[in-house]
Structures are given as structure tokens and as C-alpha cells.
Amino acid sequence: MKIPYFDAHCDTIYRCEETGCDAALEMEADREAQQAYYEACCHLRENGGHIDLLRGRGFARYGQFFALYWDAKNAPADGMFAQCLQLHARFLQEMKENRDCIMHCRSGAEVDAAIRQGKMVALLSIEGADLLECDADKLETACEWGVRLLNPVWNRANSLSGTNCEDVDRGLSERGRDFVRQMENLSIYPDVSHISDAGFWDIIKTTHGPVVASHSNARAVCPHRRNLTDDQFRAIRDSGGVVGLNLYRDFVGQKGTMEELIAHLEHFLELGGEQTLCIGGDLDGCEALVGGMNGLQDVPKIYTALRERGYSKALLEDIFWNNLYQMI
């Protein structure tokens, strides 16, 4: 049985772009292992990372938000926006080279058109406003590119806000509020994964439309600051936004089992999340996935585990496709 799958976050473009790049090699102490991690993923069509298009064809329909990401700690000499342009160019290159099977979409109508043509769906996000140099004027460029989700911060605090890792008690600055307001004017949803708790609530107070946490789990189940409190989940739910379950083992639980992942899902459902939950796997942005998963090909294991627990096909259609699709 082929299932539908629409995912809110991956770092595959970054991993493809940074094959063998020294600036990217910070994830492990073993430099050879670092090199192998990046060199496993160099082309979107087929690679040894978490996501490629050959595996994407295994779904009834497949949609993916591809994040443009770069750590500001490793900003190039010509600046972060130049790096953003380079990452965007890599995304466009992959779309061109694989136009036979995937389409870059900016709207629900374009998603529908891609599906009718039997193609996979690609949408853009930006993980960290540092890539736009925290400049609200550059949001116009992001909008022209079709960016639909944007994180004001990644793990590094910036002029817009603190994060879950740095300046954890600092919320949005006035510049940050102006930036978020401009995002809303351009129909770019704020993505609160990575932001400080104070920044989260400032976004809720600043915006009038949907708020997204593209790859965050439940803090009540796994007490990591990257995960959402119950009140935060309710606020996203009430905004009309979505929360993508993160498959990164560190944000799931001590054992990183499928059962622990399902505990996050069930907790969010208990909070009224039937129309709020989706999946935001964080694939290619982490090394260790939940439940012994090795990549995109293993996502149906989650669906099967939920069916075995008695969850209806209608609910799973919402979680695996409809809830995120309705945001586009």
C-alpha cells in the first residue's frame, strides 16, 4: 500500500550543497565520519542520505518543504545573503535537473497541478532569518522565490530574537516584530521551531494568521527546550497553523523508539490536534532517526504502526497530507 506524505521540514538542499565542505563538519568528533555524513548526500535524485527522489516515488503522492539553511557562525566573507543566494541556486538547479519528476510549487493550485502530472511537490522554507541578514526588505526576494515558511531564528540568537539555545529568555526585538509583520504581509508563515519561549509568545501576540512549528515535538513527553509546551501547541492550533512531528531521536525520548514517537502524536491529539498535526521529519538535518529509521523509505512504518493502533485512514490522511496541504 502506497501512502501520501507531505513533510514540513528537511535539510536536504543544505546537505547536498555541503558535500565535503569543512564548514559543515561539526556534527561529530570523528572527522572521517563527518565527511562520510555529508558525502552520502550530494544529488537530490539519488543519494545515500535520508531523502532522494527515487525513494519519494514510493509514495502515492509526496510533497516536501526544502529548507534553505546555513549556520551564521560559518558566515562566508561575502555575507549570509550571498550564501542564501547560493543555496537557492542549488535548489533551482535540482528542480531543473529533476523536472521530469518534481515541481517547485508556490500555491495549492500548483500542488494540485503537480499531482495531476504525477510529479512530486517541492516547496521552499528558510531556516533562520540570518540568511536574509535579518533584513525585512529582503523578504520581498524570499516571497518572489515562493518561500512559504520562515524561521526568524535557528539555534543562534540574532537581532530578531533569542533561541532555545542562546539568549533563551529574550523574545522578539522591535526589529523582530517588524520583520514578522512583514512576513505576514507577504503570506509567509512564521515558523517557531528553534525560537525561545519568549519569542514564541511574542510571535503569537504580533501575528493575526497561522503560526507553524515545522519540526517540533511535545515537551510534556520529552522535556527538551526544542519541543513545545501544551500551551504553545494550543496557541498554534488556535491560530490555524500546524505542528510537524520531528523524527530526530534526541527530540523524541531517551530510547528513541517508535512507541515514544507515537506518544508525542497521541499527546497532541489529546490536545485537540486532529487538524493541527503533520510530519516535519527534520530528515538530513540529523544523524539519528527514531525507531531505527534510515530515511524517507521508512516513513510508512509510522503509518503502519498507527493503523495497527486503530487510527482511521481519514485521520492519517489528515496527518500525512491534508493538514499541511491546507496551509498552502
Image (cartoon, rainbow, N blue to C red):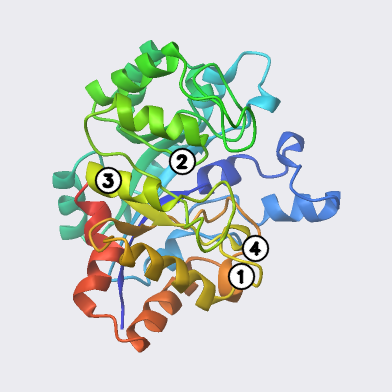
SS class, disc 3: loop
Image height of 86 relative to 262, above or below: above
Q: Position of residue 245 (x, y in %)?
A: 43, 59
Question: Which numbered disc, 2 or 3, marks the residue that appears first in the sequence?
Answer: 2
Quickly name the residue at label 3. 241
SS class, disc 1: loop
Q: Quadrant of residue 279?
A: bottom left
Image height of 14 relative to 72, above or below: below
Quickly name the residue at label 4. 288
Identify the amino acid type marked 3.
Answer: Gly
**Left or right: residue 256 compared with residue 277:** right
Picture disc at residue 67: 2
Identify the amino acid type marked 2.
Answer: Ala
Q: Position of residue 194 (x, y in %)?
A: 52, 39
Residue at 57% x, 29% y: name it.
169
Front: mark 2 or 3: 3
Identify the amino acid type marked 1.
Answer: Gly
SS class, disc 2: strand
Q: CA distance from mark 2 to mark 4?
A: 19 Å
Question: Which numbered disc, 4 or 3, marks the residue that appears first in the sequence?
Answer: 3
Q: Quadrant of residue 176?
A: top left
Picture disc at residue 18: none
Quickly name the residue at label 1. 256
Q: CA distance from mark 3 to mark 1?
A: 26 Å
**Left or right: residue 25 compared with residue 205:** right
Front: mark 4 or 3: 3
